[in-house]
Image (tube, rainbow, N blue to C red):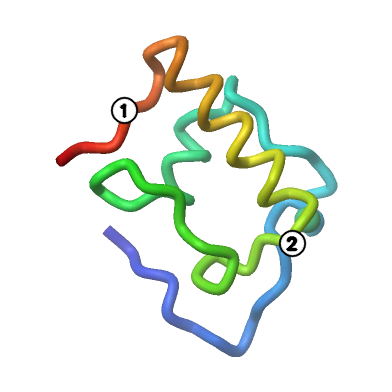
Amino acid sequence: MDTVKKSAKKSCPFCEAKRDPSYKNYEELRRFMTERGKILSRRQTGVCAKHQRMLAREIKRARQLGLLPYLVA
Ligand SMILES: [Zn+2]
């Protein structure tokens, strides 16, 4: 697992790629979650406010579809 620890670059990966987060790309969404299924904070991922909100919504959708796990205790 690669950890994003470089604080030099802090731009939103979705803005950079010019696309929005989608539950269809749940493999990608997983990168913005902890191993326990928690959504990482913007500080940790560099996602902008707009995309963070979309990300949270898409992750919830993916969970409902069984693509991503719910919070693991
Ligand atoms: Zn963005």
Can you name the residue that lies furthest to the left here?
73
Can you name the residue that lies furthest to the front here?
73
Residue 1 vs 70, above or below: the answer is: below
Label of residue 69 in the image: 1
Cβ atoms at labels 1 and 2 below 8 Å apart: no
Residue ID for mark 2 = 48
Earlier sequence position, callout 1 versus callout 2: 2
Q: Residue 2: name its quadrant.
A: bottom left
Label 2 C-beta lies within 8 Å of the nearest ligand 1 atom: yes
Can you name the residue that lies furthest to the bottom here?
8
Q: Can you give x and y, in whole percent of width and height, for residue 19 in the image? A: 80, 41
Q: Can you give x and y, in whole percent of width and height, for residue 28 in the image? A: 51, 39
Residue 33 vs 3, above or below: the answer is: above
Q: Secondary structure at mark 1?
A: loop
Left or right for 15, reference 27: right
Question: Which residue lies at the image location 25% right of the left edge and 48% below the top edge?
Answer: 35
Q: Which quadrant would the N terminus be assigned to in this image?
A: bottom left
Question: Which residue lies at the image location 64% right of the left edge and 81% below the top edge?
Answer: 9
Q: Residues within 10 Å of mark 1 (few under 14, many from 20)?
A: some
Residue 37 vs 5, above or below: the answer is: above
Q: Secondary structure at mark 2?
A: loop
Left or right for 58, reference 30: right
Q: Amino acid at mark 2?
A: Cys
Left or right for 15, reference 64: right
Q: Amino acid at mark 1?
A: Pro
Q: Can you give x and y, in whole percent of width and height, for residue 65 in the image? A: 46, 10
Nearer to the camera, 70 or 27: 70
Spatial CA distance of label 1 from label 2 is 24 Å
Label 1 C-beta lies within 8 Å of the nearest ligand 1 atom: no
